[in-house]
Image (spheres, rainbow, N blue to C red):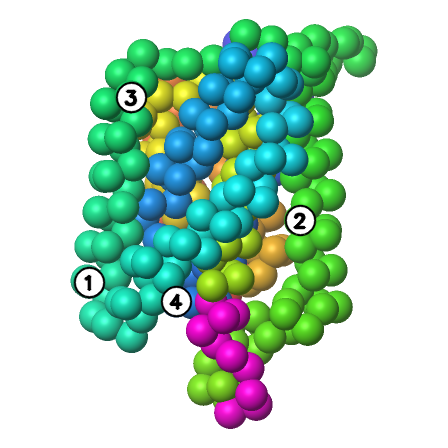
Amino acid sequence: MISPELLLQNSVDGIFLGLFYSLVAMGLALIFGVMDIINFAHGDLLMIAAYFVWLTSVDLSVDPTLTALLLIPLFFIIGIGIFFGMIQPVLGKEPLIQIAVTVGLGLILQNIALAMFKAQPKAVPYSIFNFSYSLGPLTIYASKLFIAVISIVTMYALNVFLNKTYIGLAMRSTTDNREVAQLMGINTRMLYAVTFGLGVALIALSSSLWMTFGQVQPYLGTSFSLISWVIVAMGGLGGITGVVYSGLIVGVAESLGSLFLTPSARMAVVYIIFFLVLWFRPRGLFGRR
């Protein structure tokens, strides 16, 4: 028998985890929605950013949360560089070519991490959020609560950016109809560069938050890529709302699944829900197209 307290604890932890997953998937949803590019290197970019966090925290004794101040602008520039160097040449090409380029980028990053850091997991030795407190029957972990708050604030800021700024409105227009957006004078080439840079910057923020309680190893990117694609597909390109609700579903399902299944099998619950959602709603929960 599972006690109500344990069920409540895992539900709350699942909500916190789901909000973090939403932030991780947001960069992927933004790039795919605006550019129609399938970025299979999404998780591997997060993995590389997590190694940056680990190196900065260990060598400079900087808290992982503060590394975001350095990593966000750095990875925004890296994202723009990846766009001009690898993504722009395959725009408009066959989807298989685009997939090959991003998969190749992911494999390159993964093998670089293996060569430099080996397969041993790395963790930050200390974080200012490594504590917890009790709230009735609940144990609230400060790191997870902080991550949830930052995720909510970031997604709210992104929503304001997409709805109130010229660049954000241009992104939404391009998502709805690329040809009309070009006819209206939108420079899609530069817009794509900014979009890809912003998507990678969101990955950098996610990596800083992840390292407050998680570990990094070269194959971390594979799991995050898969979870991100499940969330984006389940949301159905329904904007931030779709990503948030899908992330919450995935987080709570994974957390509650751990009560009944082994750690290696708990994701089965997530994939069953994902299958059922797409079976009854092929466009996703909030799909517009």
Q: Earlier in the sequence, mark 2 or mark 1?
A: 1
The circle drawn on residue 116 is 3
- Identify the residue under disc 4: 36
Q: Magenta stretch: residue 190 in it?
A: yes
Q: Is residue 23 above or below residue 67?
A: below
Q: Is residue 262 visible?
A: no
Q: From the viewer's perspective, is the residue at label 1 or at label 3 nearer? A: 3
In space, the residues marked 1 and 3 are separated at their CA atoms by 29 Å
Residues at marks 1 and 4 touching, judged by CB atoms closer than 8 Å: no
In space, the residues marked 1 and 4 are separated at their CA atoms by 13 Å
Picture coordinates of residue 151, whole percent (x, y) = 66, 39
In space, the residues marked 4 and 3 are separated at their CA atoms by 33 Å
Q: Earlier in the sequence, mark 4 or mark 2?
A: 4
Q: Is residue 282 left or right of residue 25?
A: left
Range shown magenta: 183-192
- Identify the residue under disc 2: 155
